[in-house]
Amino acid sequence: MIVTGGRLHFDDGTHSGDVGAGEMLLINPGERHTYRADVETSAYLVFAGLPGVRSRTWTLRRR
């Protein structure tokens, strides 16, 4: 995921942190993560697809 504006907070259950504009977050499609934004944030989700892995929908929740 490439953040293009604002700040995106993430939590995978073990690690948490945030990614700012111009930074990239690598996502393992086999794991579940939560994402949230405290300020207006925009990002691109780039997904090439992996054989044998079904896609999942995701949402960005406002706190």
Image (spheres, grey):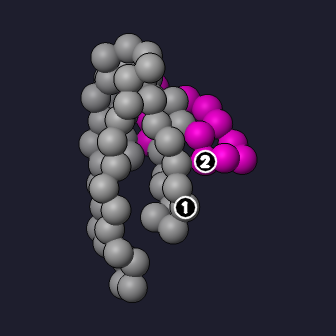
Residue denoted by label 1: 31
- Tell me: 55 left or right of 38: left
Residue 26: % across, % down: 49, 52
Front residue of this view, candidates 53 and 49? 53
Structural crowding at the residue carrying mark 1, measured as other residues with C-alpha within 10 Å and reported as few (<14), some (14–19) or many (≥20)? few
Q: Is residue 12 magenta?
A: yes
Q: Position of residue 13 (x, y in %)?
A: 66, 47
- Determine if residue 19 is in view: no
Circle 2: is it few (<14), some (14-19), or many (20+) Cα within 10 Å? few
Q: Amino acid at mark 2?
A: Asp
The reply to whether the C-beta atoms of the residues labelled 2 and 1 are less than 8 Å apart is yes
- Identify the residue shown where x is 59% and y is 40%: 11
Residue 36 coordinates in the image, percent (x, y): 45, 29
- In the rendering, which numbered label is found on residue 12? 2
Per the image, is 40 magenta?
no
- The answer to which image quadrant residue 49 occupies is bottom left
Toward which corner of the image does residue 21 lie, by quadrant?
top left
Measuring 31% from the left and 17% from the top, which residue is drawn there?
Answer: 40
Question: The residue under label 1 is which amino acid type?
Answer: Glu
Residue 9 visible to an observer of this rendering? yes
Above or below, comparing residue 63 to residue 58 in the picture: above
Task: Compute the Cα span from label 2 to label 1.
Answer: 8 Å
> Who's the residue at 38% across and 14% down the image?
39
The tally of labels here is 2
Relative to 29, residue 12 above or below: above
Query: What residue sits 44% from the left and 42% below the top?
Result: 24
Residue 16 vertical position relative to residue 38 in the rendered view, above or below: below
- Magenta residues span 11-24
Query: As drawn, is 57 to the left or to the right of 7?
Result: left
Establish if 37 lies above or below 56: above
Pick the residue in front: 18 or 58: 58
Chain-order first, disc 2 or disc 1: 2
